[in-house]
Amino acid sequence: MKNVKKILALVLCLLMVLTVFAGCNQKDEKANEPLGADLTKEEKFAEHVTLTWCFPDARGAADFSEWDRIVAAINEITMREINTTINIEVIPLGEYTEKMSLKYGANERWDVCFSGSQWNGFASAVSNGAFEALTDEYVETYLAETMALLEPEYLKAVTIDGNLYGVPLQQIYVRQNAIKFEIEWAEALGFDWASVKTYEDLEPYYDLLLANGYTECFMGAGEGLMENVTSYMGFDALVSSVFPGVIRVTDGTCKVVNQYETEEFKYIADLMAKWYNAGYFTDGVAFGGQDNPFDEDRHPVSLEPVKKPGGDEIATQKQKNDTTIKTVPIGNAVLTTSSIAQTTMAVSQNCPYPGRALAFINLLNTNEELLNLICFGEEDIDWTWVDKDNKLIQVEEGAYPGNEPFLVGNTFLSYHVHESQIGCWEETIEINKNAGASPLLGFTFDSRPIRAQMSTINGNIDEYLEPILCGMGEPTTEAAIAALNEFLYDAGLQDILDEMQRQVDEWLENQ
Amino acid sequence: MRIGKKKIDIVNLFIHLFFIVISLAIVYPFISMLSVSLLSQKEAMAEGYSIWPKNPTVESYVLVLNNFSPIAKALATSFFVCVTGTLLTVILNAMYAYAVSRPTFPARRIINFILLFTMFFGGGASASYIVNVNWLHLKNNLIILIVPGTIGAMSVIIIRSFFQGLPYGLVESAKLDGASEYQIFFKIMIPLSTPALGTIAISAFIGYWNAYYAPMMYFDYGKATTLSLYLQRLMDRMSMFADSANIPAEMLDLVPGEGMAMAVACITVLPMVFVFPWFQKYFVKGMAIGAVKA
Amino acid sequence: MNIYIKVCRKKLLEFLKLCDMIYVFKLEVYRVKTKALVKTPANQASSIRKIQRKDNWQLFSLSVPGLIVLALFSYLPMFGLVLAFKEYRAIDGIFGSQWVGFDNFTFFFTGKATTLKRLLTNTVTLNVLYLAVNTIVTIIMGMLLFELKNRLAIRVYQTIVFLPFIVSWVGASYAIYANLDHNNGIINGLLKDWGMDPVRWYAKPEHWTWILMICYLWKKVGHGTIVYYGNLMSVDTSLFEAATLDGANRFQIMMNISWPHIRPVVISFTILSLGGVFNSDFGMFYYMTNGNKPALRPRTDVIDTYIIRALQEDIGSVGMSTAIGLMQSIAGFIVLMAVNKLASWIDEKGTVF
């Protein structure tokens, strides 16, 4: 008993000390930055400022022996253009999410960061209060050039509760599922791959392949299939392609449904069962075989979640078995909140110079020289021109590894490294412009009220889903789907759907 | 050893046999790792994995080790952290264990409890980060790699049990000879306990050797890397590289698969094979019984 | 056989008595000395207390560095535990986040009861099974290794059994994948060579209780063996000599000298491990099953792997994972206290506190 008391006393003392410590965390004051759309460059950037940029490093740019030279060149441009020193804090992409979330918690000083669906998730960072809400004055003063490039609906995707929290980095925004062919196989067997419009159109090809000694024709069964069929089925998912809760893009009602109860899902499930029974894929696909990297070279047909211009040529370049890749889009092309918010640039809530941070983001989106310096290095040192009119460059062997443009700024400003890429940016811009927007574009689901139910579903759903999407629902597909739905409702799906509908309705009202 | 030499030999033979069988079973996965690391991608694709690759190649190793200077730097950091960390671990745990092993020490239960409690309850990553970075200001400081993991309940118990296993009266008689607790600890307990301390040292060394979370979180990129973090990052980057759109096609041949992962695993294990026997001389040292009788 | 044991015990007792006698004798001398030094009984008591207090201070000071490390790096961050009762919002900080009572604890209990039952059963039974087997195997190996006298052989065996301890589970998962993969795996290749049907290892949960057990043993046996072997080093070798002289055979010596000697540390280890019975080795259960494959979950899903799947990066997940961690810790701690109490009836020396 005495011991327990002693420990309690110790713990209490510690807690008291801690509360004192905790009070010390202070927010930086916002600096007084000049505002006004008609200010001149000199007026806007009179004060010299240093900003910290959390730089997502995908390829080990910072390991490059002459990284300091690149940083100096970057700073030369930023000093010239916006009188700002950029302190680049390199964070390898694999660690980005974790490091950023600890930074938020510790209230560490940083100014500009990348935020996307895969790395440092946008919605979650916003709900954690990490990003500065960008007011109109700031945007008009410091971001005008970039705003001119963006369609108004793109901004809806990064607006939450009426506040703009980020700047979408331009790239392919449209979600359209596609089927990927290695066309040599198809041509040898006399199959017209270009005419494929639905999954069922593939069946004659599979039969041909099977007749010619292939054992596993269809790659893509399993849980991962959901990502590839969401837009094919005409859905926009509120949380993720696997999580229940979608709306139909086409019917315009914005009614939230459980996709696993729909006819569309049943169609896919039945198709998988049919294909499994027909031997188009073996159960090895579902259980382990899929992960085998050495199988990569034997895919006559596979699925691609996103069709992008120029993608085929790059994929072809990468083929080790010298086949040619062609993708055929299927289903709807649609713009969704998550497809746009997957690459954004955001400003820290404790950045004292949000205006200057925006000016820097603006530079990354409009300054071709800066973006390509970061992504490819310096002209004549790290790369040379091949065709200056078409922006085609030759990267020096063993030189600066660079970075992915979509992690840095406006992808459409980046140079081409393959001849085949020429013109693909223009094409992508057109596709983005012409795509239909999901009725829910701009809606971000707030999962807080029902997180207990959501985690139960997240924890177990794949166990029910995996067999169905491998065509191996036990004892029948229908029974497996019924079991899946029974599980979902046991876990509180009705609450989730109600909450989703409530938030959607509320959001629609405020539009 | 007078009870028929032959009989003992047979028993010994069986024990040896037992250990040989176990050793083979334990070594087998390493051999399969090694063989996959020596497998070329083409052969793996064509014929699957096998224990004896037909055309062994060291391309995976070349790829991992081709950047010499960062590896040397990471290795130096790793080595420094391992050595200082291991020394600190051994001495701190031994001191702590000695205090709690003494039955006359009234606070031993509570001191023991304070340690055990931390084995179960911890504040989590966010809280630790706030403490270490905002309060203790240990960002980019090697202390954060060395000090936090030193004291551990398991280690203290191993040493404590060893102390308690030493013959009764050893401490008492020294005490009556007028030795202070410090003297008993440093002059008698430490020299007698090398087998237990060796056990702690080797597991501490490996703990430090494999650590990558702390250097990843508490160091800005480029400030300090341990070898395991370096290799981890290398692997991450290689897989990113393979998905990248903007790399020239000819560089793609460099992108490795399983082979490189296995090579990394083998490289991580290798230094230990050399370090371990060095620690072993402490395990094998028995205790000199004369200490008590004197 | 009994007679040998008796002889052993007698020798041991004699030895202990001798030690005791020396001790008592020296104590007497000490008392006489102090008596001569101090005159009044009050002074005598206080001076003995003074000496004791000095000793205690010295002992305490030995533990101080450890206590400081614990205070700074374990106890200071412990305020993070309040997150179990809060909805963590990074910007509000740990103290500023909103209190939500026990909301964070509910998610683990929503949904089907069978899932929860499966999780608990797997976690507890697998942990206990692996712990038991591992303990037995390591004790046997430690004691057998101690029987050997050839130093070179001991070194080689020790190094080899210890090697897997160095490899991370991620590294090991590649090795097991290379062996068990359906199409390219070594084992299925062998099975095919021998004219048997290949087995779809990653689709058959029933094999995995044993596959994981082998992995567990492979990785952990070396450490336990070396700990027990090291502990046996503190046995007074004169006991063995005496027993051998009296004609005890090796098995008897093992059972009556070696085993009682390591028993306390075995018990301590078991108690500590049982305290972690609700926490599993995440690395093993996750990586060895090829990223927690759904098909294998009936036999391999444990609380820690479930948490990772259930709590994806989102607001509130920090609170929920803290909550479940706290539950695991409290439950584990209760088990530890209970087992410790139990152990104190068997062998006082083995208790952990």
Image (cartoon, coloured by chain):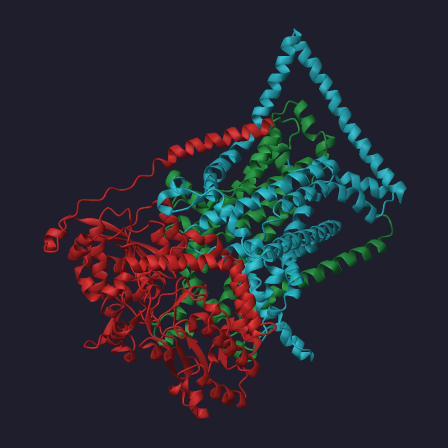
Colour of chain B as rendered: green
Q: Nearer the viewer, residue B38 or A270?
A: A270
Residue A364: which quarter of the image? bottom left
Expressed as whole percent of the image width and height from the top left, the position of residue A292 reads 52, 72
Q: Residue at x 49, y 86 (%)?
A: A206
Answer above or below: position of C91 versus A15: below
Q: Nearer the viewer, residue A149 or C217?
A: A149
Q: Residue at x 28, y 80 (%)?
A: A419
Expressed as whole percent of the image width and height from the top left, the position of residue B57 reads 51, 73
Q: Is residue C66 left or right of residue B101?
A: left
Chain letter for the part of the structure drawn in cyan: C
| Res A301 visible | yes
Answer above or below: position of A15 versus A118: above
The quarter of the image holding the C terminus of chain B is top right
Residue at the top extreme, as displayed: C40
Expressed as whole percent of the image width and height from the top left, the position of residue A451 reads 45, 53
Residue A175: which quarter of the image? bottom left
Chain letter for the part of the structure drawn in red: A
Q: Is residue A87 left or right of residue B268?
A: left
